[in-house]
Amino acid sequence: MQINTVRFGMIEIDESKLILFEEGIPGLDEYKRYALLQIEESYPIIWLQSADEGGVCLPVLDTFAVIKDYAFDIEDSDVQDLELKSPENLHVVNVVVIPDDIKGMTVNLAAPVIINTVVGKAKQIVLSGSSYNVRTPVFSEICELANAAEGGGVDAGSF
């Protein structure tokens, strides 16, 4: 299927790779189908692109790659909703906020997006009893990861 996106123009998406948010994403409840786009130029930022609205595209991060001690428990009800059978079927991303001054970039660690990669279901959950912040600074960690992958040279202009 083709999606006319605001950020990337016309893109081709394999419909079998779409991710379904049955309850929507908080604040974007009406949009249920998304695709994860990995764009080389913005690594390690990944884009959660709505398949239903080209203007809805959230920057997300595979936080485990950046913040090594990030850990949390998933409620049994969320495991059931997502039909999770094994940790290997799990992909976790967190929404990133990229302000005009990119050095102020933050990640929402308090509400990860949980994706079952086998059945294509996803849900953003709010961690109960968590000490994680919704605006955790992450710019320097992202630059370190990008520099390691590219052999150096990543700065604020890369995003």
Image: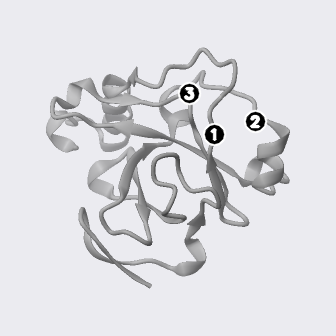
Q: Quadrant of the image for the C terminus?
A: top left
Residue drawn at 44 percent across, 40 percent down? 95
- Image-based side of 11 in relation to 82, left or right: left
Q: Amino acid at mark 1?
A: Ile
- Image-based side of 3 in relation to 112, left or right: left
Which residue is labeled 3 in the image?
A: 110
The Cα–Cα distance between marks 3 and 2, rounded to whole angstroms, is: 12 Å
Mark 2 or 1 closer to N-term?
A: 2
Residue 143 to residue 60: above or below: above
Res 125 label: 1
Between 104 and 40, the one lying in front of the other is: 104
Q: Secondary structure at mark 2?
A: loop
Name of the residue lying farthest toward the top: 131
Res 141 label: none
Res 74 label: 2
Q: Quadrant of the image for the N terminus?
A: bottom left
- Image-based side of 97 in relation to 29, left or right: left
Front position among marks 2 and 1: 1
Q: Amino acid at mark 2?
A: Ile
Mark 3 or 2 closer to N-term?
A: 2
Q: Amino acid at mark 3?
A: Ala
Residue 152 on image: x %, y %: 25, 35
Q: Secondary structure at mark 1?
A: loop
Q: Secondary structure at mark 3?
A: loop
- Image-based side of 148 in relation to 89, left or right: left
- Badge 2 density bin: few <14, some 14–19, many ≥20, Cα 10 Å: few
Displayed quadrant of residue 116: bottom right
Tell whether label 1 touches label 2 (CB within 8 Å). yes
Residue 103 on image: x %, y %: 22, 25
The Cα–Cα distance between marks 2 and 1, rounded to whole angstroms, is: 8 Å
Residue 126 to residue 68: above or below: below
Residue 69 on image: x %, y %: 60, 21
